Image: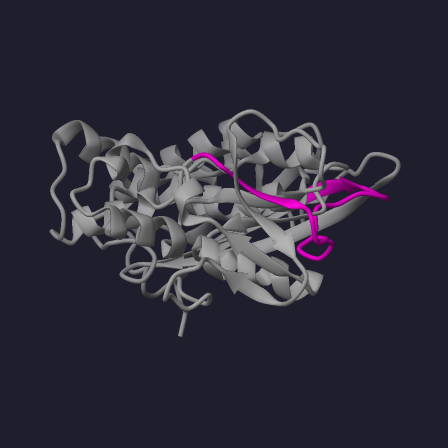
């Protein structure tokens, strides 16, 4: 007998809907979330398609974790406090073993981000995962792409280019030592949304964005929204030991500048404001427009959806 949509939802996802801001979770026509006094709602949606955003042989638990992290990264970029999320899942078949593993990845992300799963939908078709996230922001504060001023420093969190390097490993284009392969694949499959950092930057950063399509491309969004030029210094880019060990420094640098899927934060701080721990100064904001890294590389380089 075919497994019904509602049986799948209750079996694999109904236990993931508890949270401090949740008044009503899975099981009715809508979820009900509670905002504290003086807060407003932030929401974003992110879709991943098999063969486009992740290889077809990716472990289902990694697919689930990565899908939530990618969506939660948008909350981090705004400095929002996570409230809850919904999941729209398109499946080619009702494979219960696959769903069990996938739900374990979702559960790990729910626990890490305190982001309960409060609703969603399932349907049949090519494997596609859509996660909508909801967060809370103070009425008078948010991290926005616009607001960078000439003289601000440009910073990034963590290290850059690891996810792009992981794809090169998966495609057979690079074979680093086994411990570095494990590190890089973990960076691609299990990225960590910088929720705590985003909240720390509220009231400090003049502009911010998460790095999903590559540093140059995403810094370009800050430049466009702020009416300013962002000058990036390639020599300052933070690289992991895996990328520093590549035989081609130019290739490692290109991954760091244009590779997507790192889900780190790029943000601007006014002069005199100390950056949080684990963040690196990579450039400055100047009068003008666009992004300049001093190399023969288009500023819009990075992941393109079309």
Residue 122 seen by the camera: no
Q: Which residues fall within the magenta stretch? A: 135-158
Within the magenta stretch, is there residue 139? Answer: yes
| Residue beneath the point at 67% across and 30% down | 200
Residue 222's spot in the image, x, y percent? 62, 58
| Residue beneath the point at 13% across and 30% down | 178
For the image, the number of numbered tags is 0
- Quadrant into which the C terminus falls: bottom left
Within the magenta stretch, is there residue 290? Answer: no
| Residue beneath the point at 40% across and 57% down | 48
**Looking at the image, residue 237 lies above or below residue 114:** below
Q: Quadrant of residue 276?
A: top right
Residue 271's spot in the image, x, y percent? 71, 38
Residue 245's spot in the image, x, y percent? 21, 35
**Looking at the image, residue 172 lies above or below residue 184:** below
Give left or right: position of 28 versus 305. Answer: right
């Amino acid at each position: 007998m075919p497994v019904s949509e509602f049986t799948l939802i209750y079996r694999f996802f109904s236990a993931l809907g508890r949270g401090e801001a949740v008044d009503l979770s899975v099981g009715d026509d809508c979820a009900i979330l509670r905002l504290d006094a003086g807060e407003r709602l932030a929401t974003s949606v992110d879709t991943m398609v098999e063969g486009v955003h992740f290889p077809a042989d990716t472990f289902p638990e990694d697919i689930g974790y990565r899908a939530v992290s990618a969506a939660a990264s948008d909350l981090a970029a705004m400095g929002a406090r996570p409230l809850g999320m919904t999941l729209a899942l398109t499946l080619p078949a009702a494979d219960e073993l696959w769903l069990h593993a996938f739900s374990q990845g979702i559960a790990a992300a729910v626990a890490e981000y305190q982001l309960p799963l409060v609703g969603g939908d399932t349907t049949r078709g090519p494997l596609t995962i859509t996660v909508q996230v909801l967060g809370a922001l103070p009425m008078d504060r948010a991290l926005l792409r616009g607001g960078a001023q000439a003289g601000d420093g440009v910073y990034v969190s963590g290290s850059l280019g690891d996810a792009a390097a992981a794809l090169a490993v998966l495609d057979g284009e690079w074979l680093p030592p086994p411990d570095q392969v494990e590190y890089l694949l973990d960076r691609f499959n299990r990225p960590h949304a910088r929720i705590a950092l985003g909240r720390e930057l509220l009231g400090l950063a003049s502009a911010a964005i998460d790095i999903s399509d590559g540093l140059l491309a995403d810094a370009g969004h800050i430049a466009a929204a702020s009416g300013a030029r962002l000058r990036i210094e390639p020599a300052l880019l933070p690289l992991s030991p895996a990328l520093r060990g590549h035989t081609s420094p130019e290739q490692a640098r290109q991954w760091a500048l244009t590779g997507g899927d790192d889900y780190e934060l790029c943000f601007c701080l006014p002069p005199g404001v100390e950056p949080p721990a684990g963040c690196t100064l990579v450039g400055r904001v100047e009068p003008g427009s666009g992004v300049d890294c001093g190399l023969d590389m288009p500023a819009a380089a990075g992941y393109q959806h079309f």
